[in-house]
Image: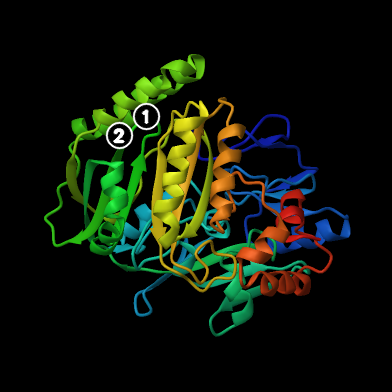
Amino acid sequence: MGSTASGKSGTWRNWGGNVTVRPAREVTPASVDELAAAVRQAAEDGLRVKAVGSGHSFTTIAATDGLSIRPQLLTGIRNIDRKAMTVTVEAGTPLKRLNVALAREGLSLTNMGDIMEQTVSGATSTGTHGTGRESASLAAQIRELELVTADGSVLTCSEKENPEVFAAARIGLGALGIVTAITFAVEPVFLLTAREEPMPLERVLAEFDQLWAENEHFEFYWFPHTGNTNTKRNNRSAGPPQPVGQLAGWFEDEFLSNGVFHAAQLLGRAVPAVVPTVARISSTALSARSYTDIPYKVFTSPRRVPFVEMEYAVPRKALTDTLRELKALVDRSGLRINFPVEVRTAPADDIALSTASARDSAYIAVHMFRGTPYQAYFTAAERIFTAHEGRPHWGKVHTRDAGYFAEVYPRFGEFTALRDRLDPDRLFQNDYLRRVLGQ
């Protein structure tokens, strides 16, 4: 899987393969000034503008038929401030490069998602998150950001400078301007011990509050058509480091999680009837293991099997009911679900359009192998999620619109009012933003 999604002859495709678009013009600016000039020029020429990262969104959030801004030259660390414990990076920097560079400096982000292919601006603008009891999404770790607005001016936003923009632009969906640099809070690099172990779903649900409370980072994967899960707890450790051995790592992470899993997906797509059997076998194939390493080597793992995904945040207290309803749906539906359901949590935060805005949240992510019909499953799952006032991940498949979001986000009106002020002519508009934010 390439880190940059692209296509021939001026077409652009996302990683999931479900979005294809042909922009009128593409630019790859080498500086913020160049980017601002391209934005001003596009406005003069009557072209809409979107920045596109690595294409890891399954929605059309980055699609445009106007000017597409590619950020691959805006990469690297601008500044490390050891006194303030912050690092400032260019918007196009892939998380993978940021994590490696920080580790070299003896630093780390506090929390992160489970892949690191995305650019920092793409990941934060769509609300990418991992799992955490106290530590929140990537965007919640932002201390300052630089934004090129519709008139081509460059705004610095923080709690002190342009605070009302800062409150919204950390997860801005690309609607308020083009993010050109991000300053993250960092801390001295630390060790995490991961403990992965299979556990019956009923036990996980019965003990969920306790598992959440006892671990800094708790998550689990439920295998549909079975009562089995694989749980993962990450907690800070005094060491010593005990990384996954090369052979064991290859076997678990490449062979089982990517190689055999991919083969099983191909088989399930061709012969749906075998899916429950394959699910039972694969859910018992993983054994318990523990390892200790620096954060990004524990939080993230390679995902080479292509899929399409929907993820909703529900109030944390509603998790067990929601998941039981999802299981009942799969059990009675005749659907053949060949991909595990991923469950994570996040504490409430103060970002206007964060899926965890002002409420402690649990995330339920449903996936289907690329090329498998997913609509029936996702539609039925979405009905369950929305009955619990779920908020969909901005970069993953969903059918919600501005009317729905105005009900489930207390600060939705604050965000749209800011957009009216910063982008009155809708330079950064596209079909997706028209649907989710309204006209």
Q: Mark 1: few, some, or many residues within 10 Å (few <14, many ≥20)?
A: some
In the shown orientation, is residue 391 left or right of residue 303? right
Outermost residue on the bottom side: it is 160
CB-based contact (under 8 Å), mark 2 and mark 1: yes
Mark 2, secondary structure of its residue:
helix
On the rendered structure, is 109 left or right of 53?
Answer: left
Residue 254 percent across, percent down from the top left: 32, 30
Q: Residue 223 location in percent, x, y?
A: 37, 35
> Which residue is situated farthest in the top direction here?
271
Give the residue at mark 2.
Answer: 253
The structure residue drawn at horizontal position 30% and vertical position 31%, both measured from the top left corner, is: 283
What residue sits 63% from the left and 75% below the top? 165
Q: Which residue is drawn at 68% across and 29% down?
A: 8
What residue is at 35 percent from the left and 68 percent from the top? 134
Query: Toward the viewer: 219 or 192?
Result: 219
Q: Which mark is residue 258?
A: 1
Amino acid at pointer 1: Asn
SS for callout 1: helix
- Identify the coloring: rainbow
Q: Of 158 and 338, which appears nearest the observer?
A: 338
Residue type, mark 2 in image:
Asp
Hey, which quadrant is residue 16 in on the image?
Answer: top right
In the picture, the quarter occupied by the C terminus is bottom right
Q: Where is residue 37 in the image (x, y as percent from the top left)?
A: 75, 62
Mark 2–mark 1 Cα distance, whole angstroms, equals 7 Å
Q: Can residue 153 be seen in this view?
A: no
Circle 2 crowding by C-alpha within 10 Å: few under 14, some 14–19, many from 20: some
